Image (cartoon, rainbow, N blue to C red):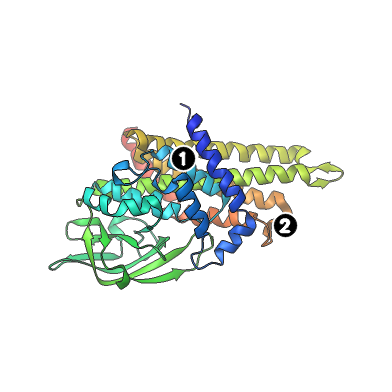
């Protein structure tokens, strides 16, 4: 099965990459990291208004463009390739899809139009105090006393610093379920230091904060939310790995040692070839997962976990090779290699490491073997 973009999707990729290449170069990325938002707000507005990327995988009935996760996946790859900080991953690809996964039409009609046009942003809080993403270990509890109230702490909340829509997975009497925070001003948001400065994480502190449940208390809903997040992250990883490969190949053609470009040495060729294979495998695994969700395939949960594991390991390897093959310049602040390396390690932890995904996949493999 081929997961290559069709003609319309190729045009979308070309549009997004063209804007990002002009507006999100290395200098622009560093300026954005020093801004209040920690991303380029003007660039985000342009992408939303001119291309409509925020509404790409949101149904038309909720203010979106009505495309599928295939198109959203291609946008995420381009965002990963550009290294630009953006609220797309946390707000659109994870939080908005979580709202849709609950099947709560009222919440979707109320929350998604603003997210789809880019005027509103959302964040999903899931992680337990120890940083793990498991429903049974969440650090927030929900109690219903004439209205739901949330208390506890959730860390590693992507894009939660500026989000006006906060979604929290909390432990309720009937089990873990998704809630929408009603009074977002009552939530204390604490910035979290990150290795990858292009990813802004916060810790949320809640003490009796008013909330409303989204959808039913169904464990399948949270599994869907997790798998959608894994698929989205894997797309960013695949795009970043492709960027690392392109930069390393270009450098190998330019860097001369002993009178020859280092890319002509057989040992370098072998390492570049290995990087290429890993990038292609990562891209295919990620696209297979998004296609599975777009078509409702029965193995979509398994493919999402495999995609996250595959892309995490591929990006970590390619990032390490990028550092090595660029030599001393790769560890300087001015070069982008360190941004790739930091993103590899940060995204590798988000929503579970490669090893955690493979441990979960092992139980599926044994069940079907």
The earlier-in-sequence mark between 1 and 2 is: 1
Corner quadrant of residue 125: bottom left
Residue identifier under label 1? 286
Which residue occupies the foreground of this view, 55 or 124? Answer: 55
Badge 1, how many Cα within 10 Å: few under 14, some, many 20+? many
Residue at 51% of width from left, 58% of height from top?
A: 42
User: What's the mark number on residue 341?
Assistant: none
> Image point 73% across, 40% down: which residue?
267
Q: Quadrant of the C terminus?
A: top left
- Kindly state the secondary structure of the residue where label 2 is placed: helix
Q: In the image shown, does 66 or 126 lie closer to the viewer?
A: 66
* 209 shown above or below 310: below
The image position of residue 265, as x and y in percent, is 77, 39
Report the side of 71 relative to 164 (left or right).
right
Q: Is residue 100 above or below residue 164?
A: above
Estimate the x, y position of residue 253 in percent, counting from the top left. Answer: 76, 41
Q: Nearer the viewer, residue 139 or 34?
A: 34
Callout 2 crowding tier (Cα within 10 Å): few <14, some 14–19, many ≥20: some
Residue at mark 1 to residue at mark 2: CA–CA distance: 31 Å
The quadrant holding residue 333 is bottom right
Q: Taking the image as drawn, is residue 269 in sight?
A: yes
Q: Residue furthest top?
A: 1
Q: Which residue is mark 2?
A: 329
Q: Secondary structure at mark 1?
A: helix
Locate residue 32, reporting x and y percent.
56, 62
Q: Residue farthest to the left?
A: 146
């Amino acid at each position: 099965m081929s997961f290559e973009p069709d003609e319309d999707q190729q045009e979308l990729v070309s549009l997004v990459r063209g804007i990002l290449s002009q507006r999100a170069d290395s200098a622009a990325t560093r300026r954005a990291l020093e801004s209040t938002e920690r991303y380029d707000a003007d660039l985000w507005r342009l992408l939303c208004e001119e291309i409509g990327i925020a509404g790409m995988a949101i149904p038309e009935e909720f203010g979106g463009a009505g495309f599928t996760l295939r198109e959203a996946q291609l946008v995420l790859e381009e965002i990963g390739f550009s290294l630009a900080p953006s609220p797309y991953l946390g707000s659109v690809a994870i939080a908005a899809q979580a709202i849709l996964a609950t099947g709560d039409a009222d919440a979707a009609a109320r929350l998604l139009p603003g997210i789809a046009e880019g005027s509103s942003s959302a964040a999903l809080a899931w992680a337990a105090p120890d940083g793990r993403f498991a429903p049974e270990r969440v650090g927030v509890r929900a109690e219903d006393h004439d209205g739901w109230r949330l208390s506890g702490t959730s860390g590693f909340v992507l894009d939660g610093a500026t989000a006006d829509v906060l979604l929290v997975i909390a432990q309720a009497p009937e089990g873990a379920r998704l809630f929408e925070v009603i009074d977002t001003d009552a939530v204390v948001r604490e910035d979290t230091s990150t290795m990858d400065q292009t990813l802004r994480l916060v810790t949320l502190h809640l003490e009796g904060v008013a909330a409303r449940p989204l959808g039913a208390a169904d464990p399948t809903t949270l599994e869907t939310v997790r798998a959608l997040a894994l698929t989205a992250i894997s797309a960013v990883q695949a795009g970043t790995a492709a960027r690392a490969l392109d930069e390393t190949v270009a450098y190998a053609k330019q860097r001369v040692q002993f009178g020859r470009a280092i890319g002509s040495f057989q040992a370098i060729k072998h390492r570049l070839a290995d990087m290429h294979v890993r990038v292609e495998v990562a891209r295919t695994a990620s696209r297979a997962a998004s296609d599975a969700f777009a078509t409702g395939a029965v193995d979509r949960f398994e493919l999402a976990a495999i995609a996250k594991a595959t892309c995490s390991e591929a990006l970590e390897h390619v990032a390490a090779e990028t550092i090595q093959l660029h030599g001393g310049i790769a560890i300087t602040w001015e070069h982008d290699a360190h941004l790739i390396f930091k993103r590899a390690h940060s995204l590798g932890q988000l929503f579970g490491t490669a090893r955690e995904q493979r441990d979960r996949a092992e139980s599926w493999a044994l069940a079907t073997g």
